[in-house]
Amino acid sequence: MLNRKNRLTAERDFRRIFRRGRRFFVPGLRIVVVQNGLGDSRFGFTVGTKVDKRAVVRNRLQRQMREMVRARVGEIRQGFDCVFVADKKVLGLNFDELSVLVYGLLKKANLLV
């Protein structure tokens, strides 16, 4: 599980990130990034009902992305708030394929140390 200090939970933080953040895309996934002025990076994950109506499917995608970030949190630059947004194209992907997308997105956003 992702540490509490690395989680985004407040709605006002999500709104701030979507309003001010820079966006980076790969097919099926995007990330919105903004500096937070803190010593740690924080992460949020969203999968909308357009991806799938079933909550169990959306929650599984969120858990998988959260685990991918947790495994690499030591390699990610500090001081950023990041929100991952999934698209329909990620539904058929297995864990390894999704992991490649997440890693590529972090690299594209220049968040890896």
Image (spheres, rainbow, N blue to C red):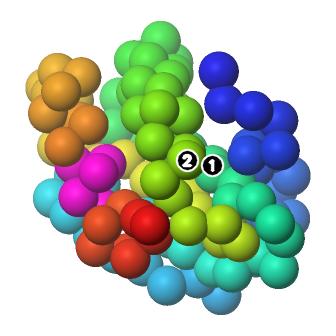
Disc 2 designates what residue?
A: 74
60 or 75: nearer the viewer: 75
- Which kind of residue does numbered mark 2 sit on? Gly
Give the SS element for disc 2: helix
The range drawn in magenta is 101-105
Task: Give the percent coordinates (x, y) of residue 81.
Answer: 67, 66
The location of residue 31, given as percent across then percent down, is 43, 64
From this viewpoint, is residue 15 visible?
Answer: no
Q: Residue at coordinates 47% horizontally, 32% vertically from top-left?
A: 71
Residue 4 in sight:
yes
Quadrant into which the N terminus falls: top right
Q: Residue 86's spot in the image, x, y percent?
A: 37, 47
Q: Is residue 78 left or right of residue 28?
A: right
Q: Main secondary structure of the magenta part?
A: helix
Q: Measuring 44% from the left and 67% from the top, which residue is drawn there?
A: 113
Q: Is residue 104 magenta?
A: yes
Above or below, 9 against 109 in this view is: above
Q: Is residue 3 left or right of residue 18?
A: right
Q: Which residue is mark 1?
A: 44
